[in-house]
Amino acid sequence: MLLPEHLPPGHALKQVLLSDHGDVHGVALIMNHRARWLSLSEIPNMGPILVPELGLPVQIGEHEGVLNFVFGFTVISWAVDTTALTLIGNLPYPQLIEVAASVRPRGE
């Protein structure tokens, strides 16, 4: 599991949801503070279909990602090694990029 090292002030990991659908195992991390929230989902990286090619290219630390805006929410998708990640939230996109860039394997 990957975790963000940096969260906006007041935010904390509130809930971890595990999913097991056959061969696909996933996790969703819910991090909120009042009405501001973030959700980080992690599933095995099965190729380019999971990191969409549509959107604005953004640099996520050492990785390349895609930024989209959907109904007032910011969505960032990228991959780290064998994990496809999607960060969704209602915070300003620069804050979400900072959070995404801080995602590391647990204990690293």
Image (tube, rainbow, N blue to C red):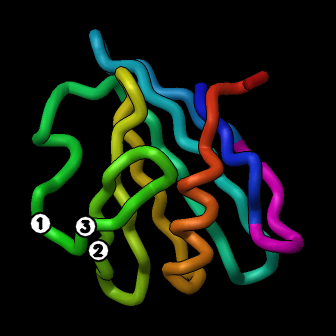
**Amino acid marked by disc 2:** Asn
Residue occupied by mark 1:
54
In the image, residue 8 sits, relative to residue 82, either above or below, namely below
**Amino acid marked by disc 3:** Pro
Residue sitting farthest toward the right: 10
Q: Give yes or no for contact between labels 1 and 3 (Cβ–Cβ under 8 Å).
A: no
The tag on residue 106 is: none
Q: Residues within 10 Å of mark 3 (few under 14, many from 20)?
A: some
Residue occupied by mark 3:
57
Q: Give yes or no for contact between labels 2 and 3 (Cβ–Cβ under 8 Å).
A: no
Cα–Cα gap, marks 1 and 3: 9 Å
Say what secondary structure mark 2 lies in: strand
Percent across and percent down for residue 95 are: 61, 75
User: What range is drawn magenta here?
Assistant: 8-15
Percent across and percent down for residue 60 are: 45, 56
Query: In the rendered view of the protein, which quadrant contains the N terminus?
Result: top right
Q: Residue at x 40, y 20 (%)?
A: 25
Q: Residues within 10 Å of mark 2 (few under 14, many from 20)?
A: some
Q: Residue 78: within the magenta?
A: no
Q: Nearer the viewer, mark 2 or mark 3?
A: 3
Cα–Cα gap, marks 2 and 1: 8 Å
Percent across and percent down for residue 5 are: 75, 47
Q: Give yes or no for contact between labels 2 and 1 (Cβ–Cβ under 8 Å).
A: yes
Say what secondary structure mark 1 lies in: loop
Taking the image as shown, residue 49 lies to the left or right of residue 102, namely left
What is the total number of numbered labels drawn onto the structure image?
Answer: 3
In the image, residue 17 sits, relative to residue 54, either above or below, namely above
Q: Nearer the viewer, mark 1 or mark 3?
A: 3
Q: Which of the two discs, 2 and 3, labels the residue nearer the N terminus?
A: 3
Q: Residues within 10 Å of mark 1 (few under 14, many from 20)?
A: few
The tag on residue 68 is: 2
Q: Residue at x 42, y 76 (%)?
A: 74
